[in-house]
Image: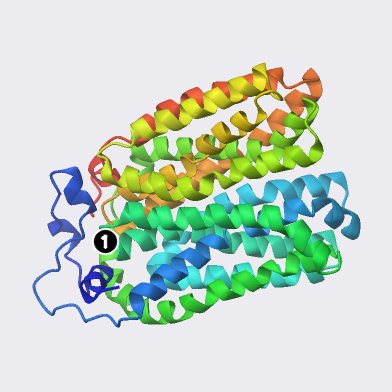
Amino acid sequence: MQDEDLQTLDPPPAPRPADSAPRPADAAARTRPAAPPAGPAPRHRPHWLGPVLVAGIVLAALNLRPAITSLGALFEEVRTGLGMGGTVAGLITSVPALCFAVFGITAPRLSRRFGPAAVVCAGMAAVAAGLLMRPFTDSAAGFLAASALTLAGIAVTNVLLPVIVKRWFPDRVGTMTGLYSMALALGTSLAAAATVPLTDALGGSWRTGLLMWAVLAVAALLPWLPLALRTRRDARAQAPGSAAADRGPSVVRSRTAWALGCYFGLQATGAYITMGWLPQIFRDAGVSASTAGVLLAVTMVMGVPLAFVIPGIAGRLRSQGVIAVVLGLFGLAGYAGLYLAPAAGAWAWALLLGVSNCAFPLVITMIGLRAKSPAGVAKLSAFAQSTGYLISIPGPLVIGTLYQHSGGWDLPLALMAALMLPQILLGVLAGRDRTIEDECGMRD
């Protein structure tokens, strides 16, 4: 990274008082970093800071889903090994979304006190610690506690990665969001596809199969240690401005924030339903178990390249609603295909749903664009993700209940398709060219 790029990484050492902050007149101004105030010039950043930030973001994103998808691949072996009953097993499958909602809401306060890099560093430490602990537990309660520790670290990192991008890459929100969204999709797919083969190659124990993902988490911790130490002084210097911003109206008053939260919830619902039930839909249609697993992998792998492309496009548009509409139409086509000819067009439906599931990188990009400052992004990210994950919790359970009581997939698929309609509408509302500061009268 060049020296001039490093200057964009450096937040102003003494931000303007909140009551004198300018209000940008257009969308382009919202995404430009604020000019430093008169006074001492920002200190020159060392050459290593930019590359280490990028590496830290990518490695953190790679670790945001393997704890979940690796467990899904070995869940039957874990249940048997720990003697889990059905209730406990059901609780463990519901814990991720609940932890993301509960712990994610604490991220802005922690970020204001310690700085976002320090909190992400602690988050990665929690992920590594939980992944190291849970293979050595001998009870369902211990396994659940270790999993909750890991999920708490993932939750705060989920919320703060958009803040990191907005703060240090304010003129490259789309590109950097695409980079870490692609890494997140890659980590999700890699853990789902590789856990069982690697477990078999390492002796067949589920404990070894889960433990190996701790290595990736420890690797992710390493770049965040110097970043946390280096940026701690910036967090202390910015604390007065952040406190002043906190006295403004709550983000709850923003219609855009609610649209983002509900859009996040519906896209997460669709993603969890797809991951949990798509193979069963194909198997009930006569597709073999092995092919059904490959079809799910195809759906998930689609997110790797598109997760990089979509945020880049979204960041260059004044309004992102058109992308939400296109992704929603892909989802409607995929569900219609599953309803009418699930086996005959299985590969096409898997591809269509894979594209539709890329609403996740879109909503993460919109979170970075719908607020003017890193503090605003922190509030919006916490609110949208916590609200969204709470909304997503009942989705897979409702679909399973409908499947059990109706004896087929017609009714569940009709519901999944119906949910795409409000998702499209909310995406259009969330993608409008405005910010939460303007809506709520908050200072940036």
Q: Position of residue 226 (x, y in %)?
A: 43, 81
Q: How many marks?
A: 1
In this picture, residue 423 sits left or right of residue 145:
left
In this picture, residue 81 sits left or right of residue 378:
right
Name the residue nearer the viewer: 13 or 281: 281
Q: Position of residue 189 (x, y in %)?
A: 62, 52
Mark 1 surroundings: few (<14), some (14-19) or many (≥20) residues within 10 A? some
In the picture of the structure, the residue carrying the numbered disc 1 is: 244
Instruction: Say if 378 sits above or below 211 in the image.
Output: above
For the point 57% across and 42% down, which residue is it?
Answer: 390
Q: Position of residue 110 (x, y in %)?
A: 45, 66
Q: Amino acid at mark 1?
A: Ala
Q: Which of the 4 image quarters holds residue 374? A: bottom left
Q: Position of residue 353 (x, y in %)?
A: 57, 33
Instruction: Work out whether residue 429 can be spotted.
Output: no
Q: Quadrant of the C terminus?
A: bottom left
For the point 51% across and 37% down, which residue is it?
Answer: 355
Q: Colour mode? A: rainbow
For the point 70% across and 61% down, which residue is it?
Answer: 147
Name the residue nearer the viewer: 341 or 77: 341
Name the residue nearer the viewer: 234 or 55: 55
Q: Which of the 4 image quarters holds residue 83? A: bottom right
For the point 59% across and 58% down, which residue is it?
Answer: 187
Q: Quadrant of the N terminus?
A: bottom left
Q: Secondary structure at mark 1?
A: helix
Instruction: Work out whether residue 412 can be spotted.
Output: yes
Instruction: Say if 412 sits above or below 21 in the image.
Output: above
